[in-house]
Every structure is written in C-alpha cells, then in structure tokens.
Amino acid sequence: MDQILQAYPKDVNFIYKQYPLPMHPNADPAARASLAAGKQGKFWEMHDEMFKNQRSLSPQMIKDTAEKLGLDMKKFDADMNSDEVKKQIQDEIQQGNAASVRGTPTFFINGKLAMNRSVDGFKAQIDEELKKKKG
C-alpha cells in the first residue's frame, strides 16, 4: 500500500476497516487493540507490530506492544474493552459482509474488488478508474 500511496498521492484514499475472522482467536483482540491504540495516535504502529509478529500474537504480546509504544495502559485497556470500540468492529464487519468480504485482506478500488493484488495490478485498476473519472 505504501507504494500505491506514493505513486498516487493525490488520487488514492486508503481506508482501512476491521474484519477479524472468527477462526483466528486473537483476531478480535488485535482489532480492538489497534483501535484502542489509535485513540492515542498509534493505530499504525500497533497494527504494524502485531502484523510483523502475528505468529506470536497473544493477549500478552498485545499488552507488551502497547507498553513498548508508550501507551497510557489504563486508557488502552479501557478503550480496548469499550462498547464504542466493540461496536465499531461490529459495524465494520457488517459493512464487509454487505460488500461480500470473505477473507482478509480484501481490497476494493472505487467499490470494485481488486482481483490482481500485485502493485502492477492495483496500478492498472486505479489507472482505469482515473481514466473513467477524467473521461
């Protein structure tokens, strides 16, 4: 995504939604942790650390990562377990279901499923959408 955002700095808006898969026991806590970290301005830092270390993802790893990022742990724990964060995840799951998301990650470009998920594939689809917009 970094390459795409650099190639299209004024044309692409990247929107990230949570869609924790139920078969992964740590997916929901990880989603809640990233949103809770986001409330302290550290969404991407938390996301990236968990993604990098997904094989060792656990409640303890999430806590350790939050501490490493210097988060206010009392606020982090409260936000992670808040009804607001849980509702946001449920709302985003419903949005994903409505868009026929079945797995993660899933990418859409102007509402159309991105089938070729290589950088060149994304660029081709983005270029096609930009042509339609200008056309």
Image (spheres, grey):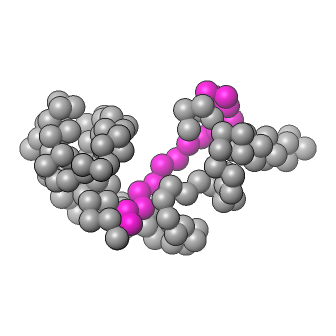
| Image side of residue 3 versus residue 95, left or right | right
Q: Where does the image place residue 133, in percent across and percent down from the top left?
A: 82, 45
Can see residue 47?
no
In this view, 22 is above or below 51: below
Q: Residue at x 61, y 27 (%)?
A: 6
Front residue of this view, candidates 105 and 17: 105
**Outermost residue toward the right?**
135
Question: Which residue appears at 20% of the width and 47% of the height?
Answer: 62
Query: Relative to 89, is 130 on the left or the right?
Result: right
Q: Is residue 16 magenta?
A: yes
The quadrant in which the N terminus is found is top right
As for residue 75 lying within the magenta part, the answer is: no
Q: Which residues are magenta?
A: 6-22
Q: 86 and 28: which one is in front?
A: 28
Instruction: Answer left or right for 1 relative to 75.
Output: right
x and y percent of residue 51 in the render? 36, 44
**Residue depicted at x 18% and y 46%:** 61
- Across and down, in percent, residue 105 comes to 50, 55
- Residue 31 in the image, given as x and y percentages of width and height: 32, 55
Query: Which of the 4 quarters of the picture holds residue 18?
Result: bottom left
> Can you name the residue that lies furthest to the front here?
55
